[in-house]
Amino acid sequence: MTINRSPVSTDLDFEKDGKQVSYLRVPHSRDTSAWGALLIPITVIKNGRGPTVLLLGGNHGGEYEGPVCLMKLARELQAGDVQGRVIIMPALNLPAVVAGRRMSPIDNRDMNRVFPGRWNGTITEVIAHYVHDVILPLCDVVLDIHSGGYSLDLAPYISMHYLADKGQMERTMAALAAFQAPLALIMEEFSGEGLLDYAVERAGKVFLCAEIGGAGRLSPQALKISETGARNLLKHFQVTEGEVLTRQAQGLPDTQFMEIPHPENYHTATIGGIYESFFDLGDLITAGQPLGQIHFVEQPLWQPQPVMAQRSGTLIGTRGPGQVEIGDCVAVVAQSWPGGDWRSEVRD
Ligand SMILES: [Zn+2]
């Protein structure tokens, strides 16, 4: 087994009842610390039999809702509250979280592009490998809390992929609904290989990705959506007691179910400059209309270059900072989930 070759160690006993707060110890030799290590915080709360839910934040740095929400939960949740097991890692890629950067400053790798990782790879790959080979096999459900980070501003949503297995699709959609985010997205991914998402889905488990806010901020609203959603997920799987706190009970409009089925839902800058969006998040977009335009500060008399909407729908993502380079994603449009009622719309 490759597990034994991982240099990562921990004093945690994942099978022990009770609440354990410790670290994954990842060797990290460097100029200032010959025998040093990264200590990645991990909390395991177990009580008897039941499902295991893995709650992850800080897969990328600069995405603050996950770490803050999960640190709170790790402090508050006690073994007596749990039936089953909850594993909480608020800062999966700790060096990136500490640096406030998407990528690890140690190896410049994106954690969510290196799964399943390598036991003898760079430090980001080593962490991913341990999570993939040791922690994921323990889990039934994984929630990975992201945001748009510095470069994107996203409408707060919970998301999943289209799944080929109908049973897995139904289980995941039920969990998606239970999160009670303003927006629930079923989407196709166009980011290439190496996502944690695929590793969990291939194992037949429930995987949800929250994308809550962004543009480098931590907003009270986004944080509340994360906290309520994470707790709702635990209730949905009966790992903690109580009813899911619905949006209706909070006096909020019901979750809107939407989808991102096509690469054309993503809009890319084809030239660098300053991006001016004509729309706010949540606005309705018609295919063919300009979504925004790119200005060229060195050439004030040049006409700005328009970015045209490729699909009709709702604007759910826009560029965070005004400055853009060629190839940057500047707008994401989602369409309504066909039929509205998600229960009858699970695809074959
Ligand atoms: Zn992220």
Image (spheres, rainbow, N blue to C red):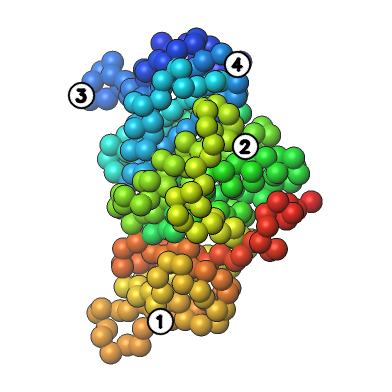
Image coordinates of residue 151 in percent, x first then y, are 36, 57
Above or below for 148 versus 274: above
Q: Residue tagged by mark 3?
A: 32
**Alpha carbon of mark 3 to alpha carbon of mark 1: how far?**
49 Å
Mark 2 burial class by Cα count in 10 Å: few <14, some 14-19, many 20+: many
Mark 1: secondary structure? strand
- The residue under the point 55% across, 17% down is 3
SS for dot 4? loop
Classify mark 4 as within 8 Å of ligand 1 or not, answering yes or no.
Answer: no
Q: CA distance from mark 1 to mark 2?
A: 42 Å
State yes or no: discs 1 and 2 in contact (Cβ < 8 Å): no
Q: Quadrant of residue 262?
A: bottom right
Residue 64 x/y as whole percent: 33, 44
Mark 4 sits on what residue? 49
Residue 90: give x, y in percent of width and height: 38, 33
Of discs 1 and 2, which sits in the foreground? 2
* Residue topped by disc 2: 206
Instruction: Name which residue type carries label 2.
Output: Val
Q: Which mark is residue 305?
A: 1
Report the residue at 45% width, 17% height from top.
79
Distance between mark 4 and mark 2 Cα atoms:
18 Å
